[in-house]
Image (cartoon, rainbow, N blue to C red):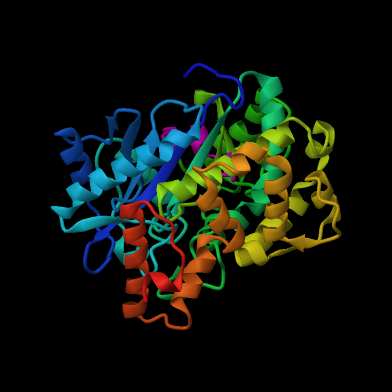
């Protein structure tokens, strides 16, 4: 157990990237080789100062995260970017590089997936045996996890309520996975379209993805954790998977580190873009936590089914999703009868973020692109146009790899002109 720290006093960021062939962009299952080079021996995690690299379920995915809560995100873009560039330099000797976005655009997970075979491999084998991990939603997904701390049940209840309200519209800001299997999937956030049912073999582990209201840690244990442990026991008699990380809702309580982990944000084109999204989300959640637009009771009383309806719309249409639930808009301080999700984010940005954050020289470029040009998924579709040939998609995603290497935003079609 890590020591508890007060709400909004520090944050944890986890970014997943895929490793691909430098020329063909095919997924390369060499995360273990990379970690071995970084550490000088076979490991599942290696610390590099304030950051660390670690393995994931699939051998072509690697995670970069901060090792301790960071109170100020402004120093993190340069720190994360430096590590990305360093690792890309190591991968170059393996004829590989890191690729951003939440899904590989043409990977076939059924035949290309290789699971992590080293320490804790029994966990991944258990997941594969029960859930079948060689498919989208398991081995072809890259996300950002944002960890928000809490200290005690009062902070937990307030943070859980505030986080729960913002979850449905996060794909409208962060979707980056419109293309899969070599074509437009029909969803701006196809990662989340797959994710929302990927663990339904054991329904209690994910519910409706949006969590129900929970009032304290003991209620969470009784209503969320114990039911899923009981339900999976017949598939997992040795208890290998009976831990809090089995819970895969859009936001989950991680009591081992006294944090609520948001899991519904797609990885962007570079760390700077993800950290800008984290900055926006943190300030909006903080405003809700402080009950600036609605009381705690009203937040907790809002029905899960209504939130799920909004989530599904945003998964499909992202910033252009129509939100017509007047009660939901009212909770967020928006008086309109309906609006697009993009318009709602613009409202939240201007009304709930402090002026000095809105005008920050650090975040200004990312905020402008996200709010004026739309989420990365929409910019990817503009760049692809109507041409989903392998050659053209490779050009689009090669440009995205360049953005990751150089730490810059992806603006669309001009990137591949």
The correct choice, above or below, for 204 with respect to 159 in the image is: below
Give residue 117's quadrant in the image: top left
Q: Residue at x 57, y 55 (%)?
A: 368
- Report if residue 282 lies within the magenta region: no
Residue 236 shows in this picture: yes
Q: Is residue 157 left or right of residue 281?
A: right
What is the x, y in percent for residue 13? 46, 37
The residue lying at 31 percent from left, 38 percent from top is 53
Front position in the image: 95 or 313: 95
The one nearer the camera, 345 or 245, is 345
Q: Is residue 234 visible?
A: no
> Residue at the location (27% across, 47% down)?
85
| Percent coordinates x, y for residue 305 in the rendering | 76, 52
Q: Is residue 301 above or below residue 186?
A: above
Highlighted magenta segment, given as a residue range = 237-251
Query: Would residue 179 be found to the left or right of residue 5 on screen?
Result: left
Depth order, front residue of 257/350: 350
Q: Nearer the viewer, residue 227 or 103?
A: 103
Q: Main secondary structure of the magenta part?
A: loop
Residue 69 percent across, percent down from the top left: 47, 26
Instruction: Report the residue that reaches farthest toward the top.
Output: 3
Query: Residue 113, percent across and down?
Result: 31, 58
Left or right of 86 in this view: 224: right
User: Which quadrant: the C terminus?
Assistant: bottom left
Query: Residue 248 in magenta?
Result: yes
């Amino acid at each position: 157990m890590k020591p508890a720290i007060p709400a909004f006093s520090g944050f944890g960021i986890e970014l997943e990237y895929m490793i691909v062939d430098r020329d063909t962009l095919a997924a390369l299952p060499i995360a273990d080789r990379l970690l071995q080079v970084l550490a000088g021996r076979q490991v599942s995690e290696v610390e590099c100062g304030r950051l660390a690299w670690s393995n994931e379920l699939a051998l072509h995915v690697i995670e970069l995260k901060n090792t301790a809560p960071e109170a100020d995100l402004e120093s993190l873009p340069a720190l994360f970017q430096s590590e990305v560039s360093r690792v890309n330099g190591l991968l170059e000797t393996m004829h590989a590089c890191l690729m951003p976005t939440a899904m590989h655009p043409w990977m076939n997970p059924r035949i290309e997936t290789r699971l992590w075979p080293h320490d804790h491999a029994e966990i991944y084998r258990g997941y594969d045996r029960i859930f079948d991990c060689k498919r989208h939603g398991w081995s072809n997904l890259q996300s950002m996890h944002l960890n928000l701390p809490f200290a005690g049940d009062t902070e937990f209840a307030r943070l859980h309520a505030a986080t729960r309200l913002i979850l449905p519209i996060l794909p409208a800001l962060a979707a980056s996975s419109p293309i899969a299997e070599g074509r437009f999937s029909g969803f701006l956030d196809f990662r989340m379209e797959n994710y929302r049912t990927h663990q339904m073999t054991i329904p209690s582990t994910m519910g409706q993805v949006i969590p129900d209201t929970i009032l304290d840690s003991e209620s969470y244990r009784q209503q969320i954790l114990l039911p899923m442990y009981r339900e999976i026991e017949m598939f997992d008699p040795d208890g290998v998977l009976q831990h809090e990380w089995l819970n895969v809702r859009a936001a989950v309580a991680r009591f081992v580190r006294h944090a609520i982990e948001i899991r519904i944000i797609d990885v962007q084109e570079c760390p700077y873009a993800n950290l800008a999204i984290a900055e926006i989300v943190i300030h909006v959640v903080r405003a809700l936590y402080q009950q600036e637009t609605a009381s705690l009771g009203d937040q907790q009383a809002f029905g899960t089914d209504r939130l799920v309806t909004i989530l599904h719309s945003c998964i499909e249409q992202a910033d252009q999703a129509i939100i017509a639930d007047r009660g939901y808009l009212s909770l967020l301080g928006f008086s309109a009868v309906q609006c697009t999700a993009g318009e709602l984010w613009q409202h939240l940005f201007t009304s709930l973020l402090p002026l000095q954050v809105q005008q920050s020289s650090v975040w200004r470029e990312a905020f402008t692109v996200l709010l004026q040009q739309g989420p990365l998924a929409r910019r990817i579709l503009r760049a692809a146009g109507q041409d989903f040939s392998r050659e053209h998609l490779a050009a689009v995603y090669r440009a995205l790899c360049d953005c990751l290497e150089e730490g810059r935003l992806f603006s669309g079609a001009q990137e591949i002109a």
